[in-house]
Amino acid sequence: MSEQSERKRVILSGIQPTGTFTLGNYIGAVRNWAKLQDEFDCLYMVADLHALTVRQDPAALRRHSREAAAMILASGVDPKRSILFVQSHVPAHTQLNWIFCCNAQFGELSRMTQFKDKSAKHPDNVNGGLFTYPALMAADILIYNAELVPVGQDQTQHLELARNIAQRFNNNYSPTFVMPEGYVTKEGAKIMSLADPTRKMSKSDTNANAFILLTDDRDTITRKFKRAVTDSEGEVRYDPAAKPGVSNLMAIYHIFTGKTMEEIQHEFEGQGYGAFKEAVGTAVADGLAPIQNEYNRILADKEYVDTVLKEGAESASRIANKMIQKVYRKVGLLQL
Ligand code: TYM
């Protein structure tokens, strides 16, 4: 980030390296990251510490972290303009996490729907990290005084908690943190599963037909869209409540073609779902092709990715360490 850009507003966002990104991750979050780089000072993070709240294979986690960084770069994040780093490389996040754990209340953490969902999904591993996860996420954001956080809809409850923590800290000590706001786009904030359009598209889904991975090849993408669950009406019409499957495909098609819902409805009038699904598959495969080429090119140069991450961690640490010193002083920790 240049000296001159220091007065720009700050953005922070993150993604867990728990596998290859889905189309949901891309549409809901990563797609927007590159777009925001001119207007804001952006920090983007591979949230590897968050991934540990669910059991991970250590070798796979390491591999996925580098792959995640390569995919973020392939999606247009420019390390000359933005800071890209791995969460565990900036220890100040975990330092602030502890302070926030001592500020976040049991009641508010218990209300987090993601905690409830993940506890139900992994009843054998309802660990302390899963419970305090939003305090770490608040630390990720507030340590840079980020004002905007580009995320999908599923993260808005965590953001609300980050605001509550910030407000409480400011009231208990003195004004320290700015209130972060979500940057959630209207269409695409929640891309649904292709197998069950009442559920979010998620990379942890056991049914591989439920999601599109950003690395899926053209045939796989086309096949998955052909199999996408819709309804028996046969009419391409946007109505998320009554027609969640078709509406989800329309939202995806809209993102990749820029066509409005009316234009899409008109385009497939009287044609049934076959032609529509085929067109969605083609649009997505065409749209992802240049990102996939970039991804393969970047990932082949491990040294480049590691240099970006090393420099990113240094830049992020410089900002984060200042904030942690300030916070430690405010809460009364002895400094020598
Ligand atoms: P994660 O890794 O689950 O997802 C990364 C981003 O992708 C969005 N997303 C979706 N958007 C639309 N439709 C979907 N089906 C879909 N699935 C996922 C998520 O909303 C998210 O924006 N806690 C975060 C990572 C994180 C973070 C942060 C984010 C850690 N610290 C600080 C922002 C700021 C998470 O688990 O995202």
Image (cartoon, grey):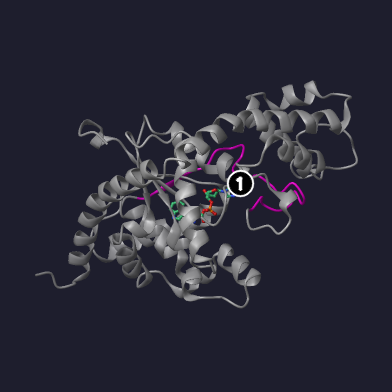
Residue 14 location (% of width, % of height): 45, 50
Residue 310 location (% of width, % of height): 31, 49
Q: Which residues are magenta?
A: 179-202
Height in image: 84 above or below 166? Answer: above
Provide the residue designation for mark 1. 22
Choose top left, top right, bottom left or bottom right for residue 177: bottom left
Q: Which residue appears at 36% of the width and 31% of the height?
A: 39
Q: Is mark 1 within 8 Å of ligand 1?
A: yes
From the viewer's perspective, is 14 left or right of 228?
left
In the image shown, does 174 or 35 lie closer to the viewer?
35
Residue 50 location (% of width, % of height): 46, 62
What type is the residue that disc 1 sits on?
Thr
Q: Which residue appears at 24% of the width and 60% of the height?
A: 324
Choose top left, top right, bottom left or bottom right for residue 96: bottom left
From the viewer's perspective, is 136 left or right of 92?
right
Residue 240 location (% of width, % of height): 74, 42
Q: Which residue appears at 19% of the width and 61% of the height?
A: 325
Height in image: 127 above or below 205? Answer: below
Image quarter of the N terminus: top left
Q: What is the residue that sits farthest to the left in this orientation?
A: 336
Residue 332 visible in rendering: yes
